[in-house]
Image: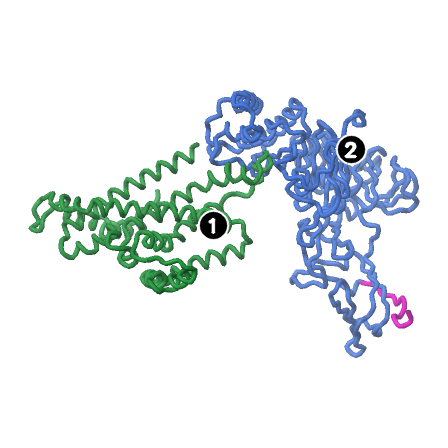
Chain colours: A blue, B green
Amino acid sequence: MEQTTKNTIVSLKDIFVRFDGEVILNHINLDIHEKEFVTILGPSGCGKTTTLRIIGGFVEPESGDVIFDGKRINGTPPNKRNVNTVFQKYSLFPHLNVFDNVAFGLKLKKMPKDEIKKKVTKMLATVDLKGYEKRSVSKLSGGQQQRVAIARAIVCDPDIILLDEPLGALDLKLRKSMQLELKEIQQKTEKTFIYVTHDQEEALTMSDRVVVMNNGVIEQIGTPEDIYNEPVNAFVADFIGEANILNGTMIDDCRIQILGRELECVDKGFGKNTPVDVVIRPEDIEITAPENGQLVGTVEKLTFKGVHYEISVRCGKCEILIHSTKSAEIDSEIGMRVIPFNIQIMNKLLPFYDNVIEAEVTYSNEGENYFEFELECETIKVENKYFPQGARVKITLPPEALSLAGDGIGDLKDVYIESVVYKGEHNEIILESDERKWLMLSDTDEQVATYVPLAFDFSKAVFEVVGNAEEG
Amino acid sequence: MKSKKPSIPYIAWMVVFTMIPIFMIGYTAFTDKNGNFSLEPFSKAFFYTGVFMKSLWIALISTAICLVLAYPLAYIITKMKHSTQNTVIMLMMIPMWMNFLLRIYAWVTLLQDNGPIDMLLSMLGIHATYIGNTGAVVLGMVYEYLPFMVLPIYTVMCKIDGGLIEAAQDLGSNSFAVFKKVIFPLSIPGVISGITMVFVPSASTFLVSQYLGGTDDIMIGDIIDKIFWTDQNTGSAISLILMVFIFVFLIIMNFFGDEEAIA
């Protein structure tokens, strides 16, 4: 498309940021083109605002380069960058009226007064605030304050405008109209907009390109259609829109097995008998008679949503969501069909399913039948199992052996919840401790980007002695 | 509808301890010793015009010095680490826990002839008298009231949203412009209340001038203190005039305050 002809205006190269020892951005790379509307999308705590603040000059990366128009601008203070920001809380100057707020940047550029007046008046007309010049900003509604903040940034004629969740404080209706207005302003002014949000719908509506972030890394960059139709992994699929995300096995090129059935798909190159994640959007499932269905299930729940019905179907142990204009009887059996093109195959988020620990027994007691080993500086005690001190043991913990310690005292403290993806049967939760990642199953919804204590249930584990430390 | 009942004790308090005394002062100021209507107390009060003017002048100078010292101090404190801020504010408050008179006595000791300051400066060959003049009175007042200037300015500066400073930088302000265009205008309310909190008590203070000042540094507070024992009517009249002056001053300050908020 035309993207190849577009010039890169700002690029982040191998950016690494850490606050108080906690990694916020983990070596990210991002190129932003001239005049495009880019949205950085991700859950709270994923590093999206930090990315924006790096471009704005409010955060200095620990390592990596910020290249602006071909020049490295690390260390350049915000006032020397031709970038303006629309802040999350608007940050309008309460001691200045609407006119003076918008004129703030121009006055600093020592522009002649009549020119400032002309520009500000024109800008206020663009954001639909004609005649508000003398109003106090504290007397404006949220939407009006928002538009003053946008006008204040754009009037300075920057190369890039950064928007940090600017619509977060507005009600739904106002937000929708502001989304369209923002897009319109961007097209009219031909500026590069970098927009940060956690609202996937907002991202899809406005952007030329969407950057999906999670836990300090960029998961996927692409057009809204790409991101929606071809998510690279279960996290992106889950975050953007509604999706049935299922565990499947790639039998061979174009052959996928899900829910015990073998279906045709269009993806290739995953190898043979590879475990994969499969995404099927609820609107891509067609309801048929049971005998014609590729999959068969029982209708459990039916909700009328206006445009379509939302139907929840139980298919074995799994729950499948369908959006269909056709209704179905509750408790009736239906068939479901999906065309191969609409089955999206993705690599698993983690290269493993069972969590394997290899550790040396640091202490053991044969009489009381327990042993201890060390993991990430914590001593972990395993009851009802004995191995002699010094033995190297391989412990295989299936995902169901992991749980979040309800008592607050887990085997590992402060484990980070990286992602929670519903797989029709359980939530698959990916956790990150100091040195590694873990896979856990849970029926409850956990809050992403929080820290929790993790407990192991060793009665579900498989142990294998792999050697003795003294032997070498 | 909000119930007015909870405010009754406060209203009663105000009536008994504020309204009635003011009324009594007013009544006394317009009567002679026999309780007849008279303007004599006021004509007597005008005898002290010179002292009055000097008091206001000293109060004004002290307030100005307090402001000049307090504003940068408050600004510097807001830039410190949070824990350091609390310590510094605490250090400023601690002397205020000491009795007011003791603090003045301390200054008398420091400033008197052959006192520590005199001794120290004598060694450098400087000989002077440091007590018994207007300068000493101003020094005592500044020492006394400086915290009342620092605290309101500091409080207002602390409340300035960091986002506004970032916004100003984002729009092209260097640190000087951030101060001039954002921090200073937004700190004006603190300055106004600081000026009020220093000027009003300075204008009516007493004892400071008696201990630190010379014979012609006597302030209107001292006059009221002395005269009230012998002539309540004139004392009341002077108090009333002082009240009017302070009232006018407060109105002017409020006017400035509003003006700044709009500009």
User: Compared with residue A5, is residue B141 higher up or lower down, i.e. above or below?
Assistant: below
Which mark identifies residue B233? none
Check disc 1 and report its element: helix, strand or loop. Answer: helix
Closer-to-camera residue (B207/B151): B207
User: Compared with residue B147, is residue A375 higher up or lower down, i.e. above or below?
Assistant: below
Please tell me in which quadrant of the rendered image residue A7 appears. top right
The residue drawn where x is 29% and y is 51% is B10
Which mark identifies residue B73? 1
The residue drawn where x is 63% and y is 25% is A185
* Closer to viewer: mark 2 or mark 1: 1
Which mark identifies residue A226? 2
User: Magenta part of the protein: which range?
Assistant: A461-472
Q: Verify whether residue B157 appears in magenta.
A: no
Q: Verify whether residue A462 appears in magenta.
A: yes
Q: Mark 2 lies on which chain?
A: A
Across and down, in percent, residue B26 comes to 17, 46
